[in-house]
Amino acid sequence: MKSFTYFSGVCLLICIVYSHANKTDIVSSLRWPERVMQKIQGNRLYASLLLGKSIEADQNICVLCDVLIGLLLEEKSLGMTNVQLSSEGEYFCEVLNFEDAKVCEGVIGPHVDVLSYIVEEATINNLNICAMLLDCEQGQDYFDWDLDIPEGETVEKVESTGAKTFRIGHITDIHYDPNYTEGKAVDCGEPLCCQSDQNDAKSGEEACGYWGASSNSDAPLQLVEEVFKEMVKKDLDYVYFTGDLVSHRVWETSRESNTATIKKIVQLFKSTFNDIPVYPVLGNHEAHPVNVFAPLSIGDDLNTQWLYDLILDEWSAWLNTDSIKETIRRGGFYTVLVREGFRVVVLNNNVCSIENWWNLYDNNDPYGQLKWLVEVLEQAEKDKEIVHILYHIQTSSCLGSWGKAFRKILNRFSNTVAAQFNGHTHRDQFFVHYNSDNKPIGVSFNGGSLIADSGAPNYKVHLVDSTGFDVWDTETYTFDLKTANEKKSIDWKKLYSFREAFGTQNALTPTELDALVFNSLNKNSTLASLYHRYYYKDGPGEAQKECDKECQKNLLCEIVTTVHNDTNICKKL
Ligand SMILES: *[C@@H]1O[C@H](CO)[C@@H](O)[C@H](O)[C@H]1NC(C)=O
Ligand SMILES: *[C@@H]1O[C@H](CO)[C@@H](O)[C@H](O)[C@H]1NC(C)=O
Ligand SMILES: *[C@@H]1O[C@H](CO)[C@@H](O)[C@H](O)[C@H]1NC(C)=O
Ligand SMILES: *[C@@H]1O[C@H](CO)[C@@H](O)[C@H](O)[C@H]1NC(C)=O
Ligand SMILES: [Zn+2]
Ligand SMILES: [Zn+2]
């Protein structure tokens, strides 16, 4: 859900700088660039912010950012307190009509504490902050670091013929909401609706239904229970859960309520899937405040250790293995040998998100996670294992330095890593990863979401080749929410099989999907439209709209852009 994450990231900062600088004259004399306008599409927080304001050239946003952040840092160094900072941010959040007072206050306070600590302790300047948030060129060098990659070439590819496959269920972005309440107004004016403390729907207004609502809503317990039961019927060998359990009530998260949610759903996974192994991943919403994953050296108030300790207890009992404990405690990542010759590696890549403030404090391979990944892959290569890598955030939303290091690793071990799986965008989509010579070296599959904000709720089943462990086919399952709410029962349907829909002949390898993008999707507009429809899971809204040439180009660019701001491959489309 874009709007929520932006709200706590970029918006927060802009709220504060606006309020502080009080330079409405600078702001109103400028024109906002296209790139920023794209970011704000459909986001009323930004829309109201930008009302009547504009900047001419792309770089002006950076100049503006530098000036305002510079002022803020200066004032802070002169003794402005967190309470003052927060209350100014809140004041403007309200005055500019971003959200109501309750939401402004709940979101801004905890983020200010983190940001303020970082500004005091780290040797960063205004340029670095703008470089991270807005991709501004100056100040980027702060984020540069390199990773040692072992010499040598990737092993010979183990081919997948599809002769024998096994089944992996993929569920992601569950966003369980313990406060979900039927009958409330779907358009409630807060970032998350269907809450017990909000108004009932008036007659003629859309009301929150039994299984959820078409937008602004998270998942009621009955929906989570239902999807798990349905998945169990699918004869699964394993399940991947790629993160985001906690609801979007981002203005009121706490360690306690996040803990309760995580425990509850882990318990439900265990009791429903029983002997079917489930491999869980941390999502950005599991942290408190949202998106913020701190280094271990930070004191108790601000650090993320409580979360790692929690999943250490919850997951290691669940996965029934001790070997994962050290890395979970260190940063929420682990690896498990699933069956002979087949390994799963789970990363906590929330650290690399451009919305994790701690990248300003310590951005050099947080938790030593990528260094560890290299060691795991080197050993897997020696042991002739094939690996699936799971993480929450699509790599294009990571800081460029992290994304480039990850790309180098993929390139070195491209035939060891057969596939990657992620969540976070709530869309049904895939990505092709390329090395710096534009050769396809990796594929990732996004699981969609259980909530309907991107069209319809869904889960997936991947058919994986038993020899080469490439994905052979992927099936998406969904249902019509409106009908389900009317009937109080869900008719699940298979929306499509990837092979049938897109006509792939071989396993879904980097080469095969690269060819699909460049030779089919890019040339056949009917097929690209189909990709658009399934991207939104054929739900109401976007999926039913026409996707014109430009819309198709954007979708295809998204597939081939896996390092932040790297548009090399997109340009070839
Ligand atoms: C900003 O400045 C104007 C004019 O100097 C003043 O009226 C207004 O109250 C100021 N706003 C804030 C939030 O300080
Ligand atoms: C983003 O990419 C453009 C074009 O490739 C480049 O000019 C710019 O410097 C890049 N920005 C960053 C922050 O790397
Ligand atoms: C549920 O709502 C109450 C207020 O009614 C709030 O205090 C609590 O944080 C909410 N829990 C979650 C998980 O959103
Ligand atoms: C384009 O794709 C559609 C849908 O898969 C297919 O029916 C059609 O034959 C394709 N057209 C061409 C020219 O390949
Ligand atoms: Zn999510
Ligand atoms: Zn997420």
Image (cartoon, helix red, strand yellow):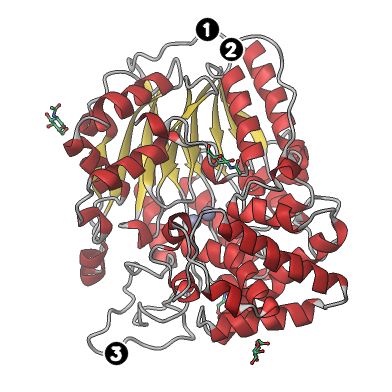
Separation of disc 1 and disc 2 at Cα? 7 Å
Q: Is residue 454 above or below residue 105?
A: above
Asked whether the residues under the numbered discs 2 and 3 touch, taking CB atoms below 8 Å apart as contact, a structural biologist would say no
Q: Position of residue 431 (x, y in %)?
A: 43, 35
Front position in the image: 320 or 341? 341
- Give the mark nearer the N terminus: 2 vs 3: 2
Disc 1 residue type?
A: Glu
The residue that disc 3 covers is: 202
In front: 357, or 442? 357
Q: Secondary structure at mark 2?
A: loop
Q: CA distance from mark 2 to mark 3?
A: 62 Å
Residue 490 relative to residue 270: left or right = left
Image: 452 above or below 416: below
Left or right: residue 231 versus residue 118 is left
In which image quadrant can residue 336 be found? top right
* Residue under numbered circle 1: 156
Q: Which disc is residue 137 wearing?
A: none
